[in-house]
Image (tube, rainbow, N blue to C red):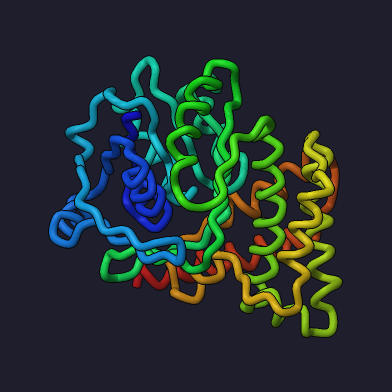
Amino acid sequence: MKILVLGAGALGGYYGARLLEAGADVTFLVRQTRADQLKKHGLVVQSPLGNVERTVNTISREQVAPDYDLVLLTCKTYDLDQAIAAMAPAVGEQTGILPLLNGVATYDILDQHFGTGRVLGGVAYIATMLAPSGHIRHLSPGDTLLIGPRAETTTALAASFYEVVSHTPGTRLLSEDIAQALWEKWVMIAAGAAMTCVMRGPIGTILTTQDGRALMTQAMDECAAVARLSGHALRPAAVHTMHDTLLDAASPWAASMMRDIDHQAPRLEADHIVGDIIRRAQRFGVDVPLMRVAYAHLQVYEARQHTAQDR
């Protein structure tokens, strides 16, 4: 299978490296600075599931051609428009697109550009980060990847990709209902991100406060209500997983968006992860007050970062 990975950051670099280990033909579409870094040092992954150090093939935007079976999309949601422009020349008549992005608004946008029949569904439960050195750090042993078709036309491609990725370390699942899996992750990530960003602390610390557990439960209930009204009520197993993650008093977990705030990132994925929950709730006439507070908080942060950059 010939795969184009858009970027070689924390997520794309990690899964690209694993796919190379499994024997896939992988090329990375990267900016020149990252291409130079990869040429000099190779692609380096440090992981509890096994380290990887590989030389890799890279191309620039000017070199993209429709030669790929699959495009793996792992950008931040706020970079989606730029990513679409960069990847469009790679999408041939038989090319599929596999996003590993949080939320479902991404799929609405990709469907408009490329058609539902080209866009597979993907859900990744993993914590990775890109170090200043260019090395990718896998922060915990957890690595679960679900992929699946969203239309009959991508059923065979999803199965072919699963056959390749199933030979990589971690839990790999070919989902029969990837849309449901996308919603279930989004609910958990939106509730967890809202709370950890507003409170500026991990789950365990939040739960030690007087109202932490009640507020976390409210955040989960608000997001789950939107999923239910949208036709994707959480399954019991998903509820159990979410409670284990977000109501664990010993948990050090925090959303990647909170880590971005800690590192003074200029932009956040607030709109696609938290803002879109609010917009969908409004369509049903449902109030989600805690999510609205969290989104306002995140918008203020981004506005202040924008102002600071303009000085």
Most foreground residue, 160 or 123: 160
Task: Give the mark count.
Answer: 0
* Closer-to-camera residue (215/163): 163
The answer to which image quadrant residue 51 occupies is bottom left
Question: Residue shown at 72%/50% (left/top)?
Answer: 278
Residue closer to the observer: 199 or 139 = 139
Please give the name of the residue rendered at 73% of the width and 66% of the height, measured from the top-left corner.
Answer: 246
Residue extending furthest toward the front: 167
- Examine the image and state in which quarter residue 201 appears: bottom right
Quarter of the figure with the C terminus: bottom left
Residue 103 as seen in the image, left or right of residue 216 = left
Residue 278 as seen in the image, left or right of residue 120? right
In the rendering, at what x and y percent does residue 59 appear? 20, 40
Q: Residue at x 51, y 65 (%)?
A: 303
> As rendered, which of 234 and 284 lies closer to the eye?
234
What's the residue at 44%, 64% (across, down)?
138
Residue 306 visible (yes or no): no
- Residue 155 lies, with reference to residue 136, above or below; the image says above
Quadrant assignment, res 1? top left
Where does residue 123 sit, x and y in percent of width and height? 58, 44
Residue 259 in sight here:
yes
> Above or below — where is 17 with respect to 136?
above
Give the x, y percent position of residue 140: 52, 67
Residue 196: image x %, image y %? Answer: 65, 71
Q: Is residue 8 left or right of residue 291?
A: left
